[in-house]
Image (cartoon, rainbow, N blue to C red):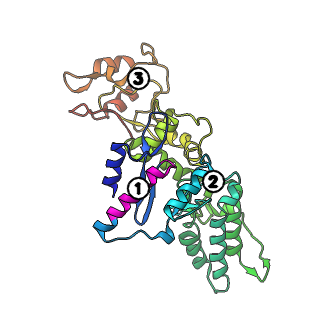
Amino acid sequence: MSTMIQHSVYEGSITGIPISRGGIRINHLLFADDSLLFCRANLREWDHIHRLLGQYEAASGQQLNRAKTSLFFSRNTQMDDRMLILNGTGLNSTANFEKYLGLQALIGRSRISTFNGIKGRIWNRINGWKEKFLSHAGKEVLLKSVIQAIPTYTMSVFRFPKTLCKEINAMMGWFWWGHKENLSKIPWMSWKGMGKKKLEGGLGYRDLVSFNTALLAKQGWCLLKYPHTLAARVFKEKYFSEGDFLSSSLGVNPSYAWRSIWGSKQLLRDGIMWRIGDGLNVKIMGDKWIPNTFSHKIQIPISGISSEAKVSDLIDITVNWWNLPVIEQLFPADIVEQICSIAISPRFLQDRVI
């Protein structure tokens, strides 16, 4: 099916959705039993897709479930065009394409109402436990393994409003301290205090805001580490056609997914450093490449080194090792020792971020 669609795109029979002017076009997304097909809102392209679906049905023995198939039109599609296509297909249209792979496809202005379904799931789960007699150890296990796991998947793509995180924390606190009918017992410690490590007197509950930021930073790391994936290519063409994720800007009218991931950039920047290969991409001053130090940078000013000098200037390619006379002349003894502890690749691979 995918091959037939790609061939039709190559012939010009189907036109996908352009990500940017002159950029890649998305014509279909397939995942498990979810299939999204994209084309222009005209009867000619839909007729071609309909023929492809017929060929696929005849070849595979599978059949399109028309009861579960619907068309979603962009806001720019004229009503006459919509009715012409719907009459020719016999399918229904949907005005609210709510979820894809369990995530919200369209994010409205109200972030809290968008994610209210997650809060409802948490509340229903807690209410189902309130009649059971549970020890504090049992409550801790349920809150950590079940409740705090419910929003994890969505948190890895979207940033939750802080108000929503506070409400989820309040529900967990209400369950932890106990309740009698509609009355809650006295919370003897704040939820922030309960989030401390057990060695520090807390119980190790997650800070949802920080956990949300960490998951989004992981998405940013994937954009940086795997630039050839479809998701990375889409974001790059849309928001940072020049440079990489770390040098990207928020852009004009960004999607909420990009706004969420971009907001974790500083955390990612604080946590990464360079693994030296050929040294051509790493600046001696300013970049993080020194191991076994807190900042991984050269903190003290070094005379004789410009701000644009690269680590490759410190490597002697004839012996495939550090140029010790130059390093000992420029740096104090402790930094010389740290630099010489970095192994040089015999194949002079490119520098990479770790």
Q: Give the residue drawn at x 45%, y 54%.
A: 46
Per the rendering, the mark at residue 330 is: none
Disc 1 residue crowd, few under 14, some 14–19, many 20+, Cα 10 Å: many
Q: Which residues are magenta?
A: 40-56
Give the distance between the C-alpha atoms of the residues marked 3 and 1, in whole angstroms. Answer: 69 Å
Above-or-below relation of 193 to 308: below
For residue 211, say whether it is visible: no
- Marks 3/2 in contact by CB < 8 Å: the verdict is no
**In this figure, which residue is indicated by the disc labeled 1?**
49
Q: Quadrant of residue 337?
A: top left
Residue located 64% across and 66% down the image: 117
Q: As drawn, is 62 to the left or to the right of 295?
A: left
Q: Earlier in the sequence, mark 3 or mark 2?
A: 2
Where is residue 338 shown, x and y percent of the image? Answer: 36, 32
Tell me the residue that label 2 is attached to: 107
The verdict on residue 41 being magenta is: yes
Q: Pointer 3: what residue?
A: 332
- The mark closer to the camera, 3 or 1, is 1
Q: Quick one: 229 or 285, which is closer to the camera?
A: 229
Q: Earlier in the sequence, mark 3 or mark 1?
A: 1
Q: Residues within 10 Å of mark 2 (few under 14, many from 20)?
A: some
Q: Is residue 113 left or right of residue 298?
A: right
**Residue type, mark 1 in image:** Ile
Q: Secondary structure at mark 3?
A: loop
Between 191 and 117, the one nearer to me in the picture: 117
Q: Amino acid at mark 2?
A: Ile
Question: Label 2's element?
Answer: loop
